[in-house]
Image (cartoon, rainbow, N blue to C red):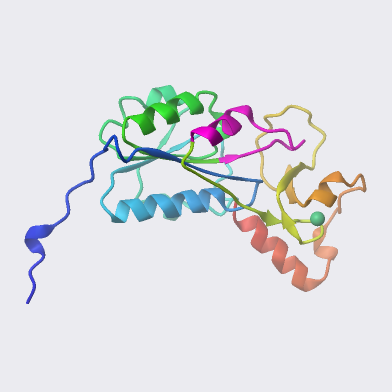
Amino acid sequence: MLDFSSKAPKIVCPSQSKGHIQVIFGPMFSGKTTELIRRVKKYQIANHKCMIVRYPHNSRNKERGVSENDVHDLNVVSMTTLSELKNETENCSVVAVDEAQFFPDVVIVAEELANDGKIVIIAALDGTYLRQGFSNILQLIPLAESVLKLNSVCMICFEDASYTKRIGSETEVEVIGGKDKYMAVCRSCHNSTSPLPQNSKHQSPCKVTTIQQATQIC
Ligand SMILES: [Zn+2]
């Protein structure tokens, strides 16, 4: 019988040749955080020491379909600027940043961490509700080894959705909210000036199911 007991894998150390940046972006409700957690768990199974960084003012994790169960076995920290990370990541080989558009220093810190041999996973909105790019996230594209744009489901016409539309009348770029303030929409529904549907449950039953599924993930 084979005996693997003496061959327990050691914790993976950061290696300068392995450091790289992965970017996951897309509109709200497109599964970015779910994909980030999936990747972190994959590395954790392979004995990487991982850390997830969250923005503290974002209280809508439950609504986004991210339960504490999803992250209970992961090392999660909250901070407002990533420069606070320096000492905490010393022994980590994987650093994942959720909602990275909120961190003004994400470009410089992600590059430093990757050059230091760490696998850096970034999940972020690529554009505002006006379809204007978040400059810090767009600057990451030429620095990253891999980039993935996820789609959601348009909450008006149920086609693929690549954009976020604000439901309220606020004009500031940073208004934190969930489905009370935003919807995922396709190109034509984003451009449409028609009034937004007051209650999507008036749609056909099969489409209501699609809406509920779409709002469970972000
Ligand atoms: Zn649409």
Answer left or right for 87 relative to 203: left
Residue 88 drawn above or below residue 205: above
The residue positioned 21% from the left and 46% from the top of the image is: 11
The residue positioned 31% from the left and 35% from the top of the image is: 117
Q: Report the front residue among 124 and 155.
A: 124
Q: What span is in magenta?
A: 124-143
| Percent x, y of residue 203 | 84, 66
Q: Report the front residue among 31 and 76.
A: 31
Residue 201 drawn above or below residue 102: below
| Percent x, y of residue 65 | 56, 54
Q: Quadrant of the N terminus?
A: bottom left
How many numbered badges does the structure rendering display? Answer: 0
Using the rendered view, name the quadrant where residue 70 is placed. bottom left
The residue positioned 61% from the left and 57% from the top of the image is: 216
Answer left or right for 111 relative to 75: right
The residue positioned 68% from the left and 62% from the top of the image is: 212
Q: Report the front residue among 200 and 147.
A: 147
Ligand 1 falls in quadrant: bottom right
Q: Report the front residue among 158 and 16.
A: 16
